[in-house]
């Protein structure tokens, strides 16, 4: 090294690169492990983000970005159907649609009761919907197994969960009877026709779930109320701001976000954050140990060289910085290769889709997707490079600080 090199950081970077090539096998192993560790963290993080996005979209599509109901609907159990239901649905709907961010309003009439084929009766969990608006806003959110979906201009029709239809031996066109308590507590019955069967992918729900149009549900319950209103916005990012505006405009009602209703989404997110956080920590520790080992061996081999450089006037800080640059080169090349590998795998899963097996409690799988998030990539790459530099500097500091005579006499 010459004195002029101290004035040119690029020269130090070049020396660091050349020093990593002294033992190419060791450097290649270090870079490979750093690359695999980085790729593993990016793929795991991308999978978690993809899962969060998918569950968020599913939850928002199911309930609406916002849910409007009476406070008691969220806080208390009903003694009779729609005890805490909303009155004046058409006027309330018009008021909500006046907000520029609101795209659509979907009513819900939720109640329980019995469903019978004349020979067998079983418990049902029924949901009254506005069919045409429901399909227009959500798209094909149900997997129709037989028959057709409901239509708003047809009343007295129902859709049954696949397992429930099998239990009642019902097929499209079959006649069934719904029995439920009215809002006054009296028992009422209504004959309906099966329009189709569906699967939600959750076997427990398919054993009980019934979809019916709002008008027929209100006729059965003898009321004009609805349980709640699902508010669908133009953008999911507008949820919090829209909630504040609508809550201020409707002080007697309660406006909740989809996150508050999405228990499954919150549980999965908490679990994945802990699992992948621990995984990232373990991989980071492994990479740090590998870089530490590589740099420690390099420094031991070059102890006499370090002593010679010190004797020629090279400052300890310059030598520590040089070794930190070597760590940066090893970590930087490894992380860049790992990011490239993660990107390749992520794009490959888009071009050649893979199906994941059904998770616990579900009967249908889902496509394996890896989110390519710029923030995740940048944060991971910067963290890995900084760790490699810090580790190299700490390892080098002890040897560089040795007396020059001891360093020159090292064998």
Image (tube, rainbow, N blue to C red):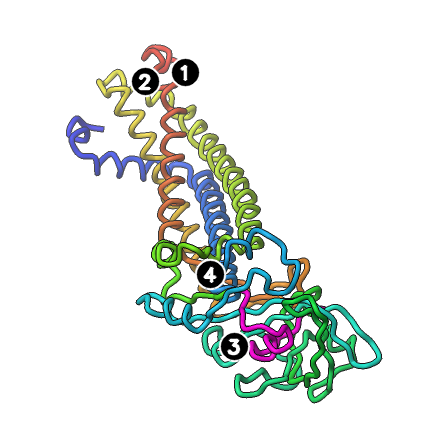
Residue at mark 3 to residue at mark 4: CA–CA distance: 16 Å
224 in the magenta segment: yes
For numbered disc 4, what is the local secondary structure?
A: strand
Q: Do the residues labelled 1 and 2 touch (CB within 8 Å)?
A: yes
Classify the position of the N terminus by image quarter.
top left
Find residue 307 and name its label.
Answer: 2
Whether residue 330 is visible here, answered yes or no, is no
Question: Residue 94 placed where, x, y %?
Answer: 38, 72
Badge 4 or badge 2: first in the primary sequence? 4
Classify the position of the C terminus by image quarter.
top left
Which residues make up the magenta segment? Answer: 208-227
Q: Which residue is drawn at 38% across and 19% down?
A: 399
Q: Which of marks 3 and 2 is in front?
A: 3
For numbered disc 2, what is the local secondary structure?
A: helix
Badge 3 or badge 2: first in the primary sequence? 3
Residue at mark 3 to residue at mark 2: CA–CA distance: 82 Å
Question: Residue 319 placed where, x, y %?
Answer: 29, 25
Q: Residue at x 53, y 87 (%)?
A: 153
Badge 1 or badge 4: first in the primary sequence? 4
Q: Name the residue under label 1.
A: 410
Image: 288 above or below 363: above
Residue at mark 3 to residue at mark 1: CA–CA distance: 84 Å
Q: Mark 3 points at which residue?
A: 130
Badge 1 or badge 2: first in the primary sequence? 2
Farthest residue in the right direction? 119
Question: Residue 10 placed where, x, y %?
Answer: 21, 38
Q: Nearer the viewer, mark 1 or mark 4?
A: 4
Quarter of image, res 274: top right
Residue at mark 1 to residue at mark 4: CA–CA distance: 77 Å
Question: Residue 365 placed where, x, y %?
Answer: 62, 66
**Count of labels shown?**
4
Whether residue 303 is visible here, answered yes or no, is yes
């Amino acid at each position: 090294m010459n004195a002029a090199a101290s004035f040119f950081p690029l020269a130090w970077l070049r020396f660091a690169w050349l020093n990593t090539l002294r033992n190419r096998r060791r450097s290649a192993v270090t870079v490979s492990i750093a690359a695999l560790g980085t790729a593993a963290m990016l793929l795991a993080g991308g999978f978690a983000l993809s899962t969060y996005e998918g569950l968020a979209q599913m939850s928002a599509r199911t309930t609406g970005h916002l849910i409007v109901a009476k406070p008691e609907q969220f806080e208390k159990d009903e003694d009779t159907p729609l005890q805490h239901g909303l009155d004046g649905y058409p006027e309330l709907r018009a008021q909500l649609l006046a907000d520029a961010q609101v795209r659509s309003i979907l009513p819900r009439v939720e109640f329980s009761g019995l469903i019978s084929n004349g020979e067998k009766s079983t418990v049902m969990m029924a949901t009254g919907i506005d069919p045409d608006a429901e399909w227009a806003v959500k798209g094909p959110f149900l997997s129709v197994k037989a028959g057709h979906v409901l239509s708003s201009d047809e009343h007295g029709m129902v859709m049954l969960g696949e397992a429930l239809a099998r239990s009642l031996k019902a097929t499209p066109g079959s006649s069934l009877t719904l029995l439920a308590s009215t809002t006054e507590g009296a028992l009422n019955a209504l004959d309906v026709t099966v329009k189709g069967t569906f699967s939600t992918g959750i076997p427990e729900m398919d054993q009980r779930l019934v979809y019916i149009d709002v008008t027929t549900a209100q006729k059965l319950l003898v009321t004009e109320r609805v349980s709640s209103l699902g508010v669908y916005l133009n953008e999911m990012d507008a949820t919090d701001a829209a909630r504040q505006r609508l809550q201020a405009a409707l002080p007697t009602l309660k406006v909740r976000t989809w996150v508050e209703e999405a228990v499954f989404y919150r549980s999965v997110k908490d679990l994945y954050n802990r699992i992948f956080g621990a995984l990232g920590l373990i991989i980071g520790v492994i990479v740090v140990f590998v870089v530490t080992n590589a740099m420690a061996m390099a420094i031991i081999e070059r102890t006499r060289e370090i002593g010679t450089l010190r004797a020629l006037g090279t400052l300890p800080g310059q030598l520590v910085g040089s070794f930190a640059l070597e760590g940066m080169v090893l970590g930087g090349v490894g992380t860049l290769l790992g990011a490239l590998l993660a990107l390749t795998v992520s794009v490959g899963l888009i071009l050649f889709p893979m199906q994941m097996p059904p998770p616990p409690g579900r009967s249908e799988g889902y496509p394996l997707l890896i989110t390519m998030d710029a923030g995740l990539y940048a944060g991971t790459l910067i963290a890995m490079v900084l760790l490699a530099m810090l580790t190299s500097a700490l390892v080098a500091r002890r040897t560089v600080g040795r007396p020059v005579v001891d360093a020159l006499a090292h064998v």
